[in-house]
């Protein structure tokens, strides 16, 4: 969602509460962003100015930012000129995404002076500039450039400030109705109404144009070839109404969220409820700054979640690949060790027919014990005596048998570890937030796959241990589902009653599911099938058509001593073959 001139107007209105406040601290979290701390009658406030090409904005914020150990040069310049300066005015250049903040300051020898901080939100050309107000010269800028970059202007210290080029088209709300109609109809009428508005007037974002057309009843119109006087009048009327809202500052900031999506997944923000997007939920906020705080915090947490999830998934996948190769080699060694009986048989034949062998033979053909008509070919070492060749085969037999035992033991351990890694992968797939990821990371670290001290993600919240997810079957039975291996253990061994039903996909990593028993009410077939379908959905077999799910009473589920988290054995189970299907979760307690 673009931070358009309407958003900037709402942000400027929020900033009027800062007039008269004094700057107490200046930080620069990154090359695009300045954070001003101000103090006044309302206490300490933070003002964020961001010239990021994608996230440019102006807002009050309650959020802390992490700052570099060494302040950037532009931050040092701002501290020199603006610390202890008093904010006098916050003004938007009319209909533009440019805002000027005027300050009463003092120079290095204490002489009163004036400074202006300019935020230009213009996509990839966005910038922050500090000006000497009396002379209009640039003191410094977050992004300097010369005429080699821009033919229109230079942004360098000591150069006179020149505003960005202005669109020559008429401003969207300044024409009377007749001139508005003439200007609009002179455009390409094959365009949809919103596109035509944008092409003929300046200062209109795509979202503003779509909203105007929607409020005028023209949203579904494929083109403008049949626009009549009524439609033109409606368009002009809605433009004037929207302009009156801006002039009066009657903003109603909202966040935009798709119905059914998690509460912290937002599509965008806007200073007004959008009639053009009726399918979206639009929770309202007291100010645009509050909405922006909520939006960017949620987005940063989602980005942190994505990065952390990718890092842990990559680690688990790497370990899985390592074990997969190891298991393949051990299986090949085990197959080779299966020749032990051949070595034993060769040794016994050589011993039995020792009198028929001659020194220096390279091969012997001896009758089989089981079929005298069949001759068994045995390779010999000519440098060894017949008796030593027999001893050699018995030695190879003993070595192969010992290797088979060791390989079998190690193969079982590696297969169990591989299954455990798959369960970690399933837990990562179930993770919905940073708290879930941290629980899985702790388990990965405890298992020895990660070394060093655990680092808390920047956006992580300090929360209590998460509880199992709760669901209800259509006939009212409670279902509990573990989010990760440790929670699976706790759910199965601590929280579940002995006569509850435990469900898990057969030989497939996934979550433990508990179907809670109710007093004087037997389990229904519907409840069992839905519980099994839920277990299948929250497993690595989610995409399959039919999934085997085992179920048994909880007292038949045991955790062996020393077993890894989430690993159990069970008996007296029955199996259902179900299609994976999710259920709507019950709201979690705050």
Image: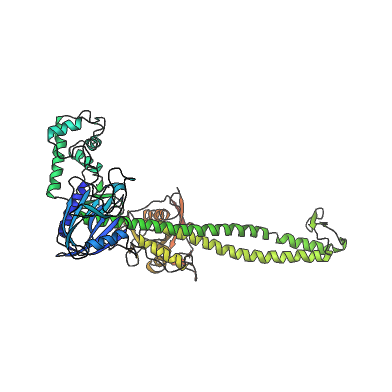
Counting every numbered tag in the picture gives: 0
Q: Is residue 8 left or right of residue 348?
A: left
Placement of 130 over or under 217, stated as above or below: below
Nearest to the observer: residue 30 or residue 522: 30
Residue 263 point in image, percent of width and height: 29, 55
Q: Give the farthest residue toward the top.
A: 226
What sort of colour scheme is used for the picture? rainbow
In this picture, residue 417 sits left or right of residue 91 = right
Please indicate whether residue 295 sits to the left or right of residue 565 in the image.
Answer: left
Decide if residue 12 is in sight here.
yes
Q: In this picture, is 213 found above or below 442? A: above
- The location of residue 232, given as percent across then percent down, is 16, 33
Query: Residue 275's x, y, as percent?
Result: 20, 43
- Look at the image and tell me in which quarter the C terminus lies: bottom left
Name the residue rendered at 61%, 60% in the picture: 330
Asked whether the viewer can see residue 258, the reply is: no
Tell me if residue 467 comes above or below residue 93 in the rendering. Answer: below
- Relative placement, left or right, of 350 versus 197 is right
Residue 109 appears in which quarter of the rendering? bottom left
Give the quarter of the image for residue 164: top left
Residue 252 position within the rendered picture, expressed as x and y whole percent measured from the top left? 17, 51
Q: Nearer the viewer, residue 268 or 410?
A: 268
Comparing 294 with 463, the one in front is: 294
């Amino acid at each position: 969602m673009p931070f358009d001139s309407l958003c900037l107007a709402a942000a400027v209105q929020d900033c009027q509460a800062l007039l008269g406040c004094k700057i107490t601290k200046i930080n620069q979290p990154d090359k695009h962003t300045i954070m001003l701390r101000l103090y006044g009658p309302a206490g300490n406030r933070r003002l964020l100015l961001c010239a990021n090409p994608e996230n440019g904005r102006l807002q009050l914020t309650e959020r802390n930012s992490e700052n570099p150990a060494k302040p950037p040069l532009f931050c040092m310049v701002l501290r020199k000129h603006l610390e202890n300066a008093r904010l006098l005015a916050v003004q938007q250049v009319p209909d533009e995404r440019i805002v000027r903040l005027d300050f009463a300051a003092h120079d290095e020898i204490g002489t009163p002076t004036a400074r202006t901080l300019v935020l230009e939100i213009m996509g990839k050309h966005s910038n922050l500039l500090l000006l000497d107000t009396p002379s209009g010269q640039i003191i410094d800028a977050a992004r300097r450039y010369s005429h080699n970059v821009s033919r229109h202007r230079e942004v360098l210290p000591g150069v006179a400030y020149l505003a960005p080029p202005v669109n020559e088209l008429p401003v969207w709300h300044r024409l009377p109705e007749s001139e508005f109609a003439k200007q609009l109809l002179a455009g390409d009428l094959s365009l949809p109404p919103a596109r035509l508005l944008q092409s003929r007037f300046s200062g209109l974002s795509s979202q503003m144009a779509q909203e105007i057309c929607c409020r005028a009843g023209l949203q579904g119109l494929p083109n403008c070839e049949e626009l009549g006087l009524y439609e033109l009048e409606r368009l002009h009327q809605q433009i004037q109404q929207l302009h009156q809202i801006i002039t009066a500052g009657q903003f109603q900031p909202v966040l935009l969220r798709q119905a059914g999506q998690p509460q912290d997944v937002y599509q965008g923000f806007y200073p007004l409820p959008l009639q053009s997007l009726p399918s979206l939920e639009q929770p309202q906020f007291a100010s645009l700054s509050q909405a922006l705080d909520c939006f960017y915090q949620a987005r940063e947490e989602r980005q942190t979640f994505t990065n952390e999830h990718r890092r842990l998934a990559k680690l688990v996948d790497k370990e899985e690949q390592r074990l997969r190769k190891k298991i393949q080699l051990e299986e090949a060694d085990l197959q080779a060790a299966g020749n032990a009986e051949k070595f034993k048989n060769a040794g016994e034949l050589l011993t039995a027919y020792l009198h028929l062998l001659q020194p220096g033979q390279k091969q012997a053909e001896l009758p089989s014990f089981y079929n005298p008509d069949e001759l068994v070919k045995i390779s010999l070492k000519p440098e060894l005596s017949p008796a030593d060749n027999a001893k050699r085969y018995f030695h190879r037999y003993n070595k192969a048998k010992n290797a088979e035992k060791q390989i079998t033991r190690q193969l079982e351990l590696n297969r169990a570890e591989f299954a455990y890694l798959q369960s970690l992968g399933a837990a990562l797939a179930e993770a919905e937030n940073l708290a879930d990821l941290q629980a899985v990371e702790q388990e990965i670290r405890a298992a020895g796959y990660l070394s060093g001290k655990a680092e808390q993600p920047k956006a992580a919240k300090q929360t209590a241990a998460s509880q199992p997810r709760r669901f209800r079957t259509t006939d009212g039975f409670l279902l509990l589902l573990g989010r990760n291996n440790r929670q699976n253990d706790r759910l199965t061994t601590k929280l579940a009653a002995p006569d509850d039903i435990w469900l898990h996909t057969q030989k497939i990593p996934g979550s433990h599911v508990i179907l809670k028993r109710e007093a004087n009410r037997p389990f229904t077939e519907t409840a069992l099938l839905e519980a099994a379908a839920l277990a299948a959905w929250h497993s690595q077999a989610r995409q399959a058509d039919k999934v085997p799910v085992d179920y048994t009473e909880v007292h038949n589920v045991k955790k062996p001593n020393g077993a890894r988290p989430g690993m159990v054995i069970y008996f007296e189970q029955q199996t259902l073959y179900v299609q994976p299907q999710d259920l709507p979760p019950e709201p979690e307690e705050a």
